[in-house]
Image (cartoon, grey):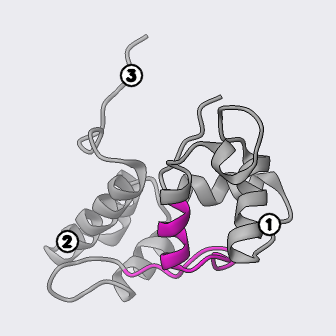
Amino acid sequence: MTRKLTPYHHLNSETRRAKRRRDAVAQVRDGESVAEVARLNHVSRQTLYTWLERSDEKTCEVELKPHGRPCLLTEEERQVLAGLLQRHPSTFGFKGHRWTLDKTRKLIKSKFNVEYASLSSVSMLLKSMCIKLRG
């Protein structure tokens, strides 16, 4: 089975979605009907109208509202964390030679006094930082 490649297949998923929104807004501004552009992009007309309302007049960039809760770590703390995770876990008193979600959660608690309630929250944090722990 062959996978169909989109015109944006070389971009990461967030960049791909942003480009799709920008292109859809530009098509409507260039005279295409909202219904047709929405159909081609597999979104509702209301979604497209929302993109149009939130889009920049010149660049067609769509400003999205953030989803979910805000991150518990500041941008600076996330940068520090990324640097800390480059070091060996034993540097911080952890056993083993690989970082785990549990070790990362404990590191965050000890360095930033921020407690993540679940390992899935730590996983989402690391994903947002483009950090993958090797298993």
Distance from disc 2 to disc 3, alpha carbons, whole Å, reads 27 Å
- In this view of the protein, which residue sits in the foreground, 74 or 54? 74
Q: Can residue 121 be seen in this snapshot? A: no
Identify the magenta region: 63-82
Percent of width and height locating residue 28? 24, 73
For disc 2, the marked residue is 26
> Does residue 13 appear left or right of residue 131 in this picture?
left
Ranked by sequence position, the earlier of labels 2 and 3 is 3
Around disc 1, counting alpha carbons within 10 Å, would you say few (fewer than 14), some (14 to 19), or many (20 or more)? some
- Judge whether residue 9 is colored magenta: no
For disc 1, the marked residue is 116
Q: Residue at x 65, y 34 (%)?
A: 98
> Does residue 100 appear left or right of residue 59 in this picture?
right
Q: Residue at x 58, y 42 (%)?
A: 88
For disc 3, the marked residue is 3
Q: Amino acid at mark 1?
A: Tyr
